[in-house]
Image (tube, rainbow, N blue to C red):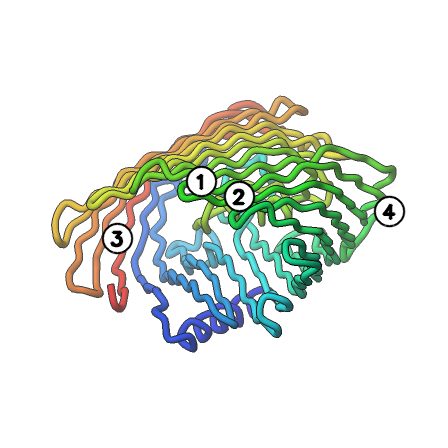
Amino acid sequence: MKFHSRLIVLIASATLAGHAMAEETRFSMSVGATWSDNVGRTSTDEDSELMPEAGLILAVNREGRLDADISADLQYRGYSDDAFDDELLGGLNARLGFEFVPDRLSWIVEDNFGQSFIDPQQVETPDNRQNLNYFSTGPDVLLPLGSRTQLSISGRWSDVNYEEGDIDSQRLSGVVGLIRSMSAASSMSVNVSAQRVEFDESPPNSDYDMQSAYLGYQAKGARTSLSVRGGYTTLRDFGESSDGPLLDLSLTRSLGSRSSLTLNVGTQFYDSAESFRREREFIDVVVGNEDVIPSRDPFQQDYAIAIWSIAGARSTLNISADWRSEDHETDTALDRKRVAGSANLSRRLGSRVSASLFGSYSNEDYDVGNVDFGEWSAGAGLEWSLSSSIAVSLRGEHYDGSGDTSAGSNLRDYSENRYTLRLTYSPGR
C-alpha cells in the first residue's frame, strides 16, 4: 500500500536528519516470540498460537533549521500455525520542518501511522484490524505586525488512507490567526479555520466543509503550561448544515521535581482521522488497535483525559484515565460512551535487572442496539541487561473481555494469556 512506502521514507528522512544535526538518535531492534492460548479471543474452541516477531523502536528529537520529531514503535508479527496472515503492527508519529526564513516561513511534513478496528463492536483480532495513515504537508507563515502582534497563517494538504473500506479522503485546510503577546510567557489570539474533506468514493452528501472561529490563550510558567481554545464550528454540505461548540483546554503541571499531571478536556467536531491524530497528541504510539471508529461521518466528541507521571531515581509510574462521548451526524448506530484507564509501574531492581507491572480497563456503551462491553488486562515483565547494549526480557499478560455485540449477547466473552520472550539490541544504551 502507498502509505507503507511513505512510512519508510519518513523514518529514513527523520533518522538522517538526526544524524545530520550531530545529535544522538535513540533506537533499538528486537527479535522474539509470543505464545497465546486463545489467539482468536473466542469464548469456545480456543486456538493456541506461536507468533515470531521482529521490532524497531526509534526516537528522534532535533531542533534547528531542519527540525525532526519522530516516535516509532513497529513490529512485524508472524503466525506459525497460519491462524492469521502475517502483519505489521505498531505506529509512527513523525514531524519534519524546514525553516526557509527563520521564525517567519517554514514547510511542515507530518505523518501518523497506526491501526484501527474494522468493526469496533467486535473483539480485537488480526482479522479485525486495519492500517491507517494520516499524511499532511504545507507551510507555516508568521508575520510581525508590530512589537507585540503577529499574523499567523498555515495551510495543509492531507491524505488519509484506510486499509479496508471506501473512506480514504483528501483534505485542504487552513488557519489564520492574529496573535497578541500579553507578556514574555503568555499570548492571546483570534483565529478562523476552514477545512474541505473529499472522499475518494463519495456517496451523495458525504463530502463536507468545516469552518471554525475561536479565541485562544497560551501561557507557560515555571511549573505550568496552559492552552485554551474556545469558539464555534459549522459543518456544511453534509446534507444540511450543523453547528456546535468548540472548546479545548490543555494543562500540564509539574507537581514536584519528578512528578507531573496533564489534563485535556473539551468538546468539538471530529471525524475518525482527526480523532486518531488527536489521540497521538496525548498517548504515544501503541502496538495494537487505536480506539477509533472508521467512518466518513463527522461527530461531536466530548472528552476528558488525565495523565499522572512520576519519574524517580529507580522507579517510574504512569497512570491515565480517558472518558469520551461521541454523537454522530447521521450514523447514530455509532454513538457511544467510553471510559478507559491504564497504569504502568517499572522498577530497577539492580544494576542489570528491572521489573514492571501494568494493567488497563475499558468499557464502551453504544446508544443503539444494546451493545455494551468491557475489557481489562494485567501483566508483569522482567528484563535482564546482558551487556551495555543487549537485553533479554520476559513478559506475561492476561486479557479478559465480556459483553454483547449487535449480533447477540455474550459474544464478547473471552479470556487470553500471552507470554513473550524478546532479545533487544540498543546501541549506546
Residue 235: x and y, percent? 80, 41
Whether residues under marks 1 and 4 lie with C-beta atoms below 8 angstroms apart, the answer is no
Mark 1 element type: strand
Residue beneath disc 1: 224
Residue beneath disc 2: 219
Instruction: Give the image quarter of residue 387.
Output: bottom left
Which is nearer the N-term, disc 4 or disc 3?
A: 4
Which is nearer the N-term, disc 3 or disc 2?
A: 2
Q: Is residue 231 above or below residue 147?
A: above
Q: Residue at x 86, y 47 (%)?
A: 204
Whether residues under marks 2 and 1 lie with C-beta atoms below 8 angstroms apart, the answer is yes
Q: What residue type is labelled 2?
A: Ala
User: Could you tell me how far apart the alpha carbons at marks 3 and 2 are, in whole angstroms?
Assistant: 46 Å
Q: What residue type is labelled 4?
A: Pro
**Foreground tag (3 vs 1):** 1
Residue 421 circle label: 3
Residue 199: x and y, percent? 76, 54
Identify which residue, 63 or 88, lies in the foreground: 63
Whether residues under marks 4 and 2 lie with C-beta atoms below 8 angstroms apart, the answer is no
In the displayed structure image, the side of residue 269 where residue 203 appears, left or right = right
User: Could you tell me how far apart the alpha carbons at marks 4 and 2 are, in whole angstroms?
Assistant: 44 Å
User: Could you tell me how far apart the alpha carbons at marks 3 and 1 are, in whole angstroms?
Assistant: 41 Å
Count residues near mark 3 (Cα–Cα under 10 Å), then give few for <14, some for 14-19, many for 20+: some
Q: How many marks?
A: 4
Q: Residue at x 56, y 55 (%)?
A: 131
